[in-house]
Image (spheres, grey):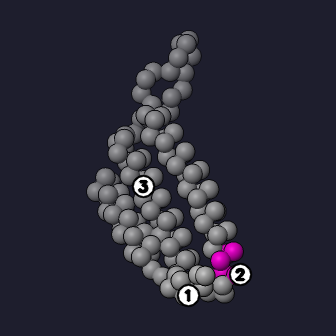
Amino acid sequence: MQISLALLIAVLFGCGFYLIMRRSYLKVILGIMLLSHAANMLVFTSAGIVRSPAPLVPEGMQAAEASGADPVPQALVLTAIVISFGVTAFALVLFRRAYDVVGTDDIDELRHTEI
């Protein structure tokens, strides 16, 4: 399971870096999205994948037994998902505005529009 997740993370990082090096803004945005997903999966799997029962409080006890998953990686991934969504939305708005003004999404053609 961990080997297949490691391979999936490597593929996501590879595809993300490949797309970021393209000349199209849309491909760069897709690359950023893939990199954020790969980073989230890396943080999530670095905490270890364990099967444990749900942290339910048995009848007659005050608290659940300490056998649940570690909440720190889950909180980090949740925060990273929100931040990556915001960055992606901002990049999409910038792409849309640049495309409306210049009429192309090629990064090399945008250099000729500088004054």
Q: Residue at x 47, y 70 (%)?
A: 31
Q: Which mark is residue 112?
A: 1
Tag count: 3
Q: Which residue is mark 2?
A: 100
Residue 106 visible here: no
Q: Which percent across, then down, holds residue 60?
A: 56, 11
> For the view shown, which residue lies furthest in the left direction?
3
Residue 20: name its quadrant: bottom left
Q: Is residue 8 magenta?
A: no
Q: Of tags 1 and 3, which is closer to the observer?
A: 1
Q: Which percent across, then down, holds residue 53?
A: 45, 33
Residue 105: name its quadrant: bottom right
Does 48 sit left or right of 31 as displayed?
A: left
Read off the magenta span.
96-101
Residue 44 higher or lower than 14, as above or below: above
Q: Main secondary structure of the magenta part?
A: helix
Between 86 and 99, the residue placed more toward the observer is 99
Q: Earlier in the sequence, mark 1 or mark 3?
A: 3
Q: Secondary structure at mark 1?
A: loop
Q: Which mark is residue 39?
A: 3
Q: Secondary structure at mark 2?
A: helix
Q: Dot 2, how many residues are within 10 Å of its Cα: few (below 14), some (14-19), or many (20+)?
A: few
Between 62 and 26, the residue placed more toward the observer is 26
Q: Which percent across, then down, holds residue 87?
A: 58, 59
| Amino acid at pointer 2 | Asp
